[in-house]
Each structure stands twice: as C-alpha cells, then as structure tokens.
Image (cartoon, rainbow, N blue to C red):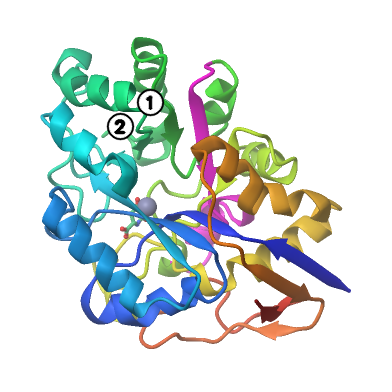
Amino acid sequence: MKLILNSPLDMHLHLRDGEMLKNVTPLTSDNYSAALVMPNLTPPITTKETLFKYRDEILALSSENFKPYMSLFFQKDYNYEFLKELKDEILVVKLYPAGATTNSESGVVNFNIEELRPTLEAMSELEIPLSIHGESDGFFLDREAEFIPVYEKLAEAFPKLKIIMEHISSKEAVKILDKHENLYASITLHHILYTFDDVAGGKLNPHLFCKPVLKREKDRRAILKLALNAHPKVMFGSDSAPHSQEAKEGALGAAGVFTAPVTLQALAELFEKHNKLDNLQKFVSNNAKKIYNITPPQKEVVLVKEKFSVPKLYGNIVPILAGQELSWSIESVK
Ligand code: DOR
Ligand code: ZN
C-alpha cells in the first residue's frame, strides 16, 4: 500500500542556527518541498541583513528542490517602505506576545490596536499575512482561550489582513475560525495526537512539553476533526522545535516538541486510522498553497505501509515517538 504526497509543506518550523541548524535542516528539506521558517532566534530576525543571511544559511544546508519561506519577527514600528522592500522575501510577519515562549522576550507587550496599527496597516496594504502565537499571560491552560478576544479584535480591525492562528490547541480557537473570513490556523502533529495527560498525567514527559501546552481531550478532538477533514482554513505546521536532550530533560526544561523527521509518517498513520487518508494531501499541501497563494517546488514523496522505527535520538535531540514503531515509512522522494 502506497501513498503519494505532492509537495508536502510544513508551514511552521523552527530550524535554529549554528550546529542545530546544520543538524535539523536536512531532516525537513529531504522530505518537504517547502517550510515556513520561524524568526525567533537570539536576536530575532528583524532586519534585511539577518533575514538574507539566515535564508542563505538554510539554503546552503538544504537538499535540492527545497524552499525556505522566511518570516520576520513582528515589531510595532516597521514602516511601509521597509516591508515593501521585503515583501517578496518573506511569507509572514510573526507576532509573539512578550515572554510567551522560547526567545520571545522582545515580543509585543500591549495589544492596544492603535499601538500596533502602523505595522499592521502596512502589512494589510502590502498583503503580508500576520502569523500569531496567541497566548495571554494567564493560567497556562487558559492562555489560548484568553487570547481569543485579541484574535477577534485584530480580525475585525484589519479585515483585509490574513491572520494565522498558529498551532491552535483549544476548542475556543476552533470556534472562531469560521466566524471571521480572514482567520486561518495551523495545526501541529503533537496537538492532535496527545493531551496534557501525556505530559504530566503519569511520569513527567518533558519531550511533549511545548507552548501552547497540550490541552484536554475535548480540545484535541476539536482540532483533530479540522485536520482530518482538511478544513480549507487549516494547514499543517509542525512547530517542530528542537532543543538538546539536556535542555529538555534538565531543570527548567525548554518548551518545544521535535517532530520534523517523523511528521509525514505519523500523519499517515493517524489519517489512516480515521479513514481519512484521502484528505492528507490537502492538509499537508493544497490548503496552504491556497491560503498563502504560493507555488512551492515540485516534489513527490512516496510513503509505504512498512514499519518505521523512530530513532531514539537525532544527534542530541530526542524526537516525538522516540523508540516507537510507526506503520508508515518514507520510501522515496523525487
Ligand atoms: O513550544 C514551543 N517552542 N512553542 C513555541 O512557540 C516556540 C518553540 C521554540 O522555539 O522552542
Ligand atoms: Zn513555533
């Protein structure tokens, strides 16, 4: 039994820099046609120079036929000319609330629309989508739900701006998706596979600790339903976020789940289990192409129903499902 995926896309990916970048870039570029690369380095990507340097580093480490779609780290005072110059070099501007997650300290402190207007108005005019990590600074399980009014306020204030709710994790986010024409969402593998019970219900599993945290079963089911049905306003974005084993397993464990090398195999297994394999192409490619109006490189990834034993480590990074067996593996890529 085979499954052919045309130009699979990972629309939310952390590649880091330095050694980590070297180790993880091929794990995505081998099996994906393109990926949207997040800008939360230290310091974050906010200038033309750092953007181009980062893009070129990624390209130098990528396998052939792979396109890194780049992003800028949101700042409230980007001006129109600056964004106009970079419009064709970026796919989104990514907004982080200050301190919400890894390397987001210089994010947005105040969600007063008037303060954010200069950048958002320019983006709207230039048709640059806004990608958002939507979490409040409240109780950890409620952070996404508490951020919903901000999503709605932004969607209403900038009706021409495409807004992507990244890595949705709650039924509350699912509920507003169809309420606003300009709201879209990315969905990770880990948020449709697991709940917070898998993180802390038994022995602590730091490798499933991420932001936004995995939530309750009813949240997982609501998001899973969107993914399995390939709802046209959602797309796959792994949020694969590598940290070293020491950083994940030590005290003050880092947030982020490393999923890049197993995403397609695990998605095939999950979609097959729910009799929805026919929708996987849309979820991992077609929807994103339409939402972002992009034409990624042509790449054909052939999956086959043969066992894949997930390695326990990729270098010093522990992947999701480490040491477990999946029922699908990647046979070839061309
Ligand atoms: O868990 C997370 N890790 N969530 C994010 O939003 C960022 C990411 C990272 O960069 O490690
Ligand atoms: Zn992320």
The residue under the point 26% across, 34% down is 137
Disc marking residue 136: 2
Q: Which residues are magenta?
A: 180-205
Q: Are marks 2 and 1 in contact (CB under 8 Å)?
A: yes
Specify whether tag 1 is near ligand 1 (CB below 8 Å).
no
**Vertical placement of 251 versus 163: above or below?**
below
Q: What element does badge 1 sit on?
A: helix
The residue under the point 55% across, 86% down is 311
Q: Amino acid at mark 1?
A: Glu
For the residues labelled 2 and 1, the Cα–Cα distance comes to 6 Å
**Vertical placement of 126 versus 139: above or below?**
above
Specify whether tag 2 is near ligand 1 (CB below 8 Å).
no
Q: In which quadrant is the C terminus drawn?
A: bottom right
Q: Quadrant of ligand 1?
A: bottom left
Q: In which quadrant is the N terminus drawn?
A: bottom right
Work out whether mark 2 precedes mark 1 in sequence or the reverse, and give the earlier one. 2
Q: Give the residue number, with chain letter if any, for mark 1.
A: 146
Q: Amino acid at mark 2?
A: Ser
Residue 134 in percent (x, y) is at: 36, 35
Residue 85 in percent (x, y) is at: 20, 40
1 with respect to 63 (left or right): right
User: Residue 187 in magenta?
Assistant: yes
